[in-house]
Amino acid sequence: MNILTDLFQFLRKPDFVSIQDNAGNKIKILFTLFLCLLVIMFGMNVVVRILQVIVTNISLTSSTAGQATQIPSWWKTWNLFQIILLSPIFEEFSYRYALGQFNVTRIKISVSLIIAFHISYLLYFYKLHQLCESNLILHFFSLYGSMFTIATILFLIMSLCNKQLALLKNKWNSNFSFIFYLSAVLFAIYHVYNMPVLFLLSLFAGALIFGYTRIRLGLGYAIALHILWNFLSSFRLFIN
């Protein structure tokens, strides 16, 4: 199978077909997709940075770069752990776990997490950030504690409507292309909290490859690809 050809065909019309192969071959496919992701994301990021300079009429090096913000000593370690491990797991379960054949439980988990993510981040960034920025435990529970609490409540509420949700199978199947692209759009929008708006387009492109990986190879491989990408993206934090 030519993975790049299959990827483009899939993006034209997303489907539910998974690749039935051994782990070794799936890992090879994963690294092919990783290289594809590198080319697409870095290419788009270069274009976005050029547009950013043109639109804002400022240089890539900020004139206020010397004004460092005081941050807690634990923040760098926590930030790396969050970016490289926690975020890929939570984001894949939220935005891509439900992708594939219709499954009520997976849909409830994904929808609950997506809604909980946005509510928790809004609460954290606009209400709780300053209170928790000096304490790792408060930071963790204010963000992830509220996220899990809200997601659990939403999941239980939706569980009361299992029979009604099961009736959506035909609509899910007939509108899967829209659902697939909607998940990528929502994934990009979610990053508006911590990324410049111009970079959302490259995140949308990345979400398409993560979604393809999730369906063709499985959720675990999508998480692995996401971890690889976030590790590479955050490499500069290791050397600062």
Image (cartoon, helix red, strand yellow):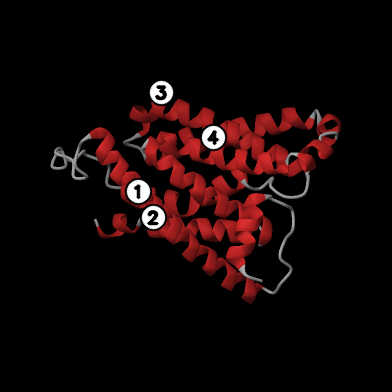
Q: Pick whichever, 56 or 129, lies toward us.
A: 56
Tell me the number on the disc at residue 117: 4
Which residue position holds label 2? 43
C-alpha span from label 4 to label 2: 29 Å
C-alpha span from label 4 to label 3: 15 Å
Q: Residue at x 79, y 36 (%)?
A: 171
C-alpha span from label 1 to label 3: 34 Å
Q: Residue at x 64, y 50 (%)?
A: 12
Left or right: residue 8 versus residue 53 is right
Compare marks 4 and 2 and give the one earlier in the sequence.
Answer: 2
Is there CB contact under 8 Å for labels 2 and 1?
Answer: yes
Which residue position holds label 1? 47
Left or right: residue 231 versus residue 51 is right
Q: Quadrant of the N terminus?
A: bottom right
C-alpha span from label 3 to label 2: 36 Å
Compare marks 1 and 4 and give the one earlier in the sequence.
Answer: 1
Say which quarter of the image contains residue 131.
top left
Of badges 1 and 3, nearer the viewer stands 1
Left or right: residue 164 versus residue 69 is right
Compare marks 4 and 3 and give the one earlier in the sequence.
Answer: 4
Image coords of residue 179 (percent x, y): 67, 40
